[in-house]
Image (cartoon, grey):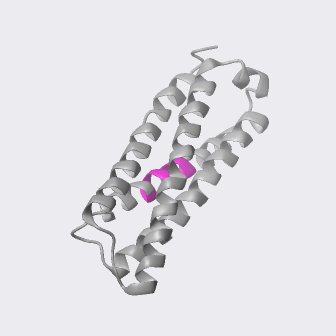
Amino acid sequence: MTEAWLAFFHLSAVLGWIVFASAQAALCRPEWLNAAALARLRRLDTLLWVATAAVLVTGLLRIYGGAKGAAWYWGNWLLHLKLTLFIVTVVMMPGTTRRLSRWAARHAADGSLPPAGEVNGVRRLVMTETHVVALIPLAAVFLARGFGG
């Protein structure tokens, strides 16, 4: 029963990550950006970081508290692939956070919004992150079925 709950919480965290990243990518458009959208993008960024932490914590709980045991997981190259893709994504995320913070500070100081090129750059970064994350479930389904060990 514990294994099912751990899988549920981990999957829920991954789905949360996808929802917040997708919402951020959808909202990050030059033609839609205004003060309210900027505030919403910053909230989504915070929620995305929370979801990212939840993915990591629930993943570790599956490794160390799951039925298969840590040795089985760590001995499987698919886990290492999943972690590598996760780390690649996490390394990209601070770029978005810094830019959103810079935009908010500039907006608070003089009411200006970022130029379209900057907004499109952040959107591309978020889309890249989301596409990298989309590869993780591919490795996950094979890992869960015992491949790669």
When the figure is inspected, residue 70 is found, relative to residue 29, above or below; the finding is above
Across and down, in percent, residue 46 comes to 55, 65
User: Could you tell me which quadrant the N terminus lies in?
Assistant: top right
Across and down, in percent, residue 39 comes to 43, 77
Q: Nearer the viewer, residue 69 or 44?
A: 44
Prevailing secondary structure class for the magenta stretch in the rendered image: helix
Q: Is residue 1 visible in the rendered structure shown here? A: no
Residue found 51% across the figure and 61% down from its top: 97
Residue found 36% across the figure and 81% down from its top: 35
14 vs 33, left or right, is right
7 vs 69, left or right, is left
Quadrant housing residue 110: bottom left
User: Could you tell me which quadrant the C terminus lies in?
Assistant: top right
Extreme left residue here?
Answer: 31
Asked if the magenta segment contains residue 13, the reply would be yes
Residue found 78% across the figure and 38% down from its top: 65
Tell me which segment is drawn in magenta: 11-20
